Amino acid sequence: MTPQQAVITAVSERFGPKAAITDPGDIAPWLIDWRGRWHGASAAILSPASTGEVAAIVALAVEHRVALVPQGGNSGMVGGATPPADGSALLISLRRMNRIRSLSANLAVAEAGVILETLHNAAAEAGSRFPLTLGARGTATIGGLVSTNAGGTQVLRFGTMRSLVAGLEAVLPDGSIHDGLSALKKDNRGPSLDQMFIGAEGTLGIVTAAALRLVPAISDRSVAWLGVASPEAALAILRSLERDTGRIEGFEIIPRDSLAKVLLHVPGTRAPLAGEHPWHVLVEATAHDPAEEPSAALLTRLLAPLIGADIADATISANEAQARAFWHLRDSISEAERAIGPALQHDISVPVDAMPRFMVDAAREVEAAFPGTHASGFGHLGDGNVHFHVRPPEADQAGWIATNGAATSRLVHDLVVAVGGSISAEHGIGQMKKAELARLGPPARLHALRAIKAALDPHGIMNPGKLID
């Protein structure tokens, strides 16, 4: 019996047939990443139903020296939850661990397999809100969001997942359990183990549950759609809004070509503004207290002085349906991009003040270095996160990417580092950016990451081939 088969058999015997899925047809959908770029192989999906079962599985994996690849909703963008192609690892799915263990006015304890949208709904029923959302909210799980330090569209006000985690439960690579779910505000027993697991992509252990901070439910929200001449104008609007209110939750910048692709390829969409504008901005304002100034009135008051200067045209949502329609345009950009063929997609971050110039200059430099390409960026101007896409020449797009993709991404990443940015803003490193992290990562950071990995996972069984060797 092979080591892998020994683990599979032991898991099935101890925890029942649901805990070890071996049918190739059932396994196949989970061997490919969301983008279809990374393809792996695995003899089984191990599917524990409790933290104790996760700990037992990890202990078995250590005993037999079998690698494990943790997986949640499999909605990641960098191949971080895809097993190696050689079949040397077993998948361990946290999807059966999908209970919300507790929920109060300001804290929810959710297991790793809880889908983000499920948590949103549960918090809303209790009169609260979990203030992190993203396009994959219907499939992304809490464990994956923690492990990749997910961002989304509300980072401007509430921060990334790191800011929203009050405590974690996780299984370490030796099978022991770390329980930090008490969410103590003061705990000075050394560095935070909870924070160590956030963004580690399952390479230091398996997150099994999280205590998450909630905020009061929204009593009112409004979304404005603005037409602007340049990213610099958009930044001027952002700075003006930041001076006058703490109620701005979303601030997104979208180039004309990205909006055009959505209108062409996503059914039911329509342009918010009548005219043509080089750039578009989406702004969301919210209220938590019914006594506050209504969000539509707030946006009208704050944006009116900017009309004709930084703002060429604007409209403010008249109701919730229109607010959702504006966000649908923004959330559909990736879907529209995928509909028109392959592109090189870069999830990067730069200092907010540098973002307008970077979006323009980087696109120009990439197009000059690789004639026939089209480069453009969109994203979260409020936190400096640029989704920078490079579309290959029309002829033989796949072939061009295979030949020139790595060099193009290296140029983009070099430009990012030159302005003090990061090659990964919110999607993680995974398989896709591991070599680039090794090339461009600060030496002190790389040394620390390697030392921590070697100390906690000496046998290399936790998500091999991801983040860092």
Image: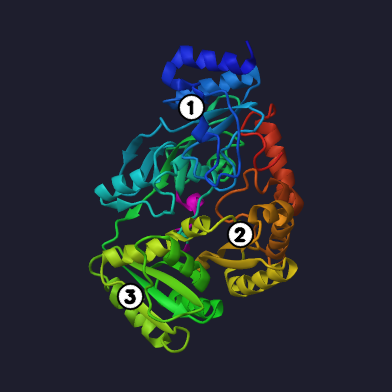
Residue 157 part of the magenta segment:
yes
Is residue 36 among the parts visible in the rendering? yes
Residue extent of the magenta highlight:
156-164
The amino acid on which the numbered mark 1 sits, given as a three-letter code, is Gly
Return the residue at label 3. 316
Magenta stretch mostly in which secondary structure?
helix
Q: Is residue 76 left or right of residue 354?
A: left
Q: Which quadrant of the view contains residue 407?
A: bottom right
Quarter of the image with the N terminus in it: top right
Between residues 167 and 356, which one lies in front from this camera angle? 356
Q: Kindly identify which numbered label has been placed on residue 25.
A: 1
Q: Is residue 249 left or right of residue 45?
A: left
Crowdedness near tag 2: few (<14), some (14–19) or many (≥20) residues, C-alpha within 10 Å: many
SS category of the residue bearing label 2: strand
Return the residue at label 2. 348
Q: CA distance from mark 3 to mark 2?
A: 29 Å
Q: Position of residue 94 (x, y in %)?
A: 46, 32
Between residues 356 and 131, which one lies in front from this camera angle? 356
The amino acid on which the numbered mark 2 sits, given as a three-letter code, is Ile
Between residues 8 and 215, which one lies in front from this camera angle? 8
